[in-house]
Every structure is written in structure tokens, then in C-alpha cells.
Amino acid sequence: MLYEVALIQKPTKNEAEDGKQEELILPPTPVIACDDKAAGVKAVLDNKDKITVDLSRVTVLVRPFA
């Protein structure tokens, strides 16, 4: 099945207090996977060079491609 996956970096508590907002790490990207969880994992693994922060600060957004 085809999914769209985007990765967003959340600011730290101090950065949020200073007014920093979420940052787009990976724009919506098509991924072929058997389910939404696999699509999210595949997107993270395929783009790990773009993720320069702790993964606990990354939100993975997945939706079926319509």
C-alpha cells in the first residue's frame, strides 16, 4: 500500500520557551509498505542521515495516499 510520511522535529523545552516552533525534517514523501507503522519505520531508516536530533524529539506523521 502507498503512504505519505513526514518527519517533524519538536523543539526542546528551552527552545519552545524562546518561541521556536516545530521544524519539518522530511516533507511528505511517498513510501510503499504493508501498513502505516512499517511506512513510518521505513521513512526513518531511509532518512536517518537527515535526522540530527534525538529520535524522542521527532514526530512521524503517516497517512494513506489517496
Image (cartoon, rainbow, N blue to C red):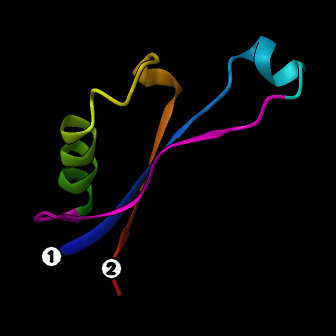
Q: On the rendered structure, is 13 left or right of 4?
A: right
User: Are the residues at dot 2 and dot 1 in contact (C-beta closer than 8 Å)?
Assistant: yes
Residue type pointed to by label 1: Met
Q: Residue 27, how many percent across, how many down?
A: 46, 55
Q: CA distance from mark 2 to mark 1?
A: 8 Å
Q: Label 1: state its secondary structure.
A: loop
Magenta span contains residue 24? yes
Looking at this rendering, what residue extends furthest in the right direction? 18
Q: On the rendered structure, is 33 left or right of 39?
A: left
**Residue drawn at 18 percent across, 46 percent down:** 42
Residue type pointed to by label 2: Phe
Quadrant of res 18: top right
Q: Which is more N-terminal, label 1 or label 2?
A: 1
User: Residue under circle 1?
Assistant: 1
User: Residue under circle 2?
Assistant: 65
Magenta span contains residue 56? no
Q: Main secondary structure of the magenta part?
A: strand
Query: Which of 42/26 is in front?
Result: 26
Quadrant of res 16: top right
Magenta residues, start to end: 20-35
Q: Residue 24, how many percent across, how many down?
A: 56, 44
Q: Looking at the picture, does residue 5 appear above or below residue 40?
A: below
Classed neighbour count for the residue bearing mark 1: other residues with Cα under 10 Å, few (<14), some (14–19), many (≥20) = few
Q: Residue 21, how many percent across, how many down?
A: 76, 36
Q: Residue 61, how many percent across, how many down?
A: 45, 54
